[in-house]
């Protein structure tokens, strides 16, 4: 398991590159599949992204790309927990 700060930086970078057309969906899908496991609050979003990107698609439409970006954003925008 990597540090969550590294996860957030990497997902943010991949999301931006995908949104800008610098990375295609197949590369992104393989990258997401290779992510390790993470604890809450990020883990459930990473697992959801893995499940989403693992679905076979006949066509990558604008709606699919929007959902792709939403799944990546869910990871990045998850507020950290503060444990005391």
Image (spheres, helix red, strand yellow):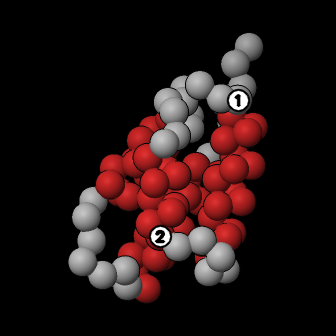
Which residue is at a point 66% across and 41% down the rendered structure image?
7
Which residue is at a point 69% across and 50% down the rendered structure image?
10
The answer to which of 2 and 82 lies nearer the viewer is 2
Disc marking residue 25: 2
Disc marking residue 68: none
Residue 47, horizontal then vertical, whole percent:
42, 41
Side of 53 where 65 appears, left or right: right
Asked which secondary structure carries label 1, the reply is loop
Q: Which residue is mark 1?
A: 3
Nearer-N-terminus badge (1/2): 1
Residue 46, horizontal then vertical, whole percent:
49, 43
Q: State whether residue 19 is above or below residue 50.
A: below
Asked which secondary structure carries label 2, the reply is helix
Disc 1 vs disc 2: which is toward the camera? 2
Q: State whether residue 63 is above or below residue 56.
A: below
Residue 16, horizontal then vertical, whole percent:
68, 69
């Amino acid at each position: 398991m990597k540090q969550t700060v590294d996860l957030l930086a990497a997902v943010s970078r991949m999301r931006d590159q995908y949104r800008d057309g610098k990375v295609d969906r197949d590369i992104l899908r393989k990258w997401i599949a290779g992510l390790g496991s993470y604890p809450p609050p990020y883990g459930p979003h990473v697992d959801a992204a893995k499940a989403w990107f693992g679905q076979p698609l006949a066509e990558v439409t604008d709606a699919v790309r929007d959902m792709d970006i939403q799944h990546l954003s869910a990871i990045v925008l998850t507020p950290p927990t503060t444990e005391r």
